[in-house]
Image (tube, rainbow, N blue to C red):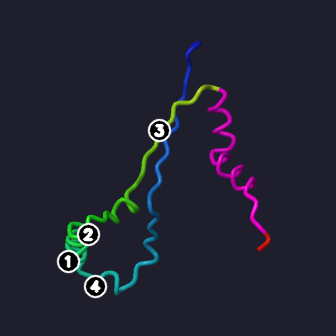
Amino acid sequence: MGNQHFVAKIEVAPAFDPDDLTDADLDVDHLEMIADMIAATNSTGDDEFDELAPRQFQFELCPTCSRQYIQSPLGAIRSSMRLKRYSEN
């Protein structure tokens, strides 16, 4: 057990709230909308789907880091937010 490590898996994906659906959403021709988006992507080379695609991350952690991660999974984000200083302008 001297080489023990842990794996942290994170998935970040757009949230979807089914309660936000309206009758207008259900009336949309989604196949046509997707075809238009694909055509626009092909013509511009701009891939806007990348922003909406789920992202998966996997990190191998030593025992000490895994304990710190479990105690505060977003600790790195929180501490970096505290360190930011904004000007008074």
**Residue 13, x across and y down, in percent:** 44, 57
> What's under tag 3, amino acid-wise?
Gln
Disc 1 residue crowd, few under 14, some 14–19, many 20+, Cα 10 Å:
few
> What's under tag 1, amino acid-wise?
Glu
The answer to whether residue 75 is magenta is: yes
Q: Which residue does the image show at 75% across and 53% down from the upper left?
A: 83
The quadrant of the rendering that contains the N terminus is top right
Q: For marks 2 and 3, give the one nearer the viewer.
A: 2
Q: Secondary structure at mark 1?
A: helix
Disc 4 residue crowd, few under 14, some 14–19, many 20+, Cα 10 Å:
few
What is the number of the mark on residue 58? 3
Q: CA distance from mark 1 to mark 2?
A: 18 Å
In the shown orientation, is residue 18 left or right of residue 74? left
Magenta segment, which residues? 64-87
Which sits earlier in the primary sequence, circle 4 or circle 3? 4
- Main secondary structure type of the part rendered in magenta: helix
Q: CA distance from mark 4 to mark 1?
A: 12 Å
Identify whether 87 is placed above or below 24: above
Q: For marks 4 and 1, give the one nearer the viewer.
A: 1
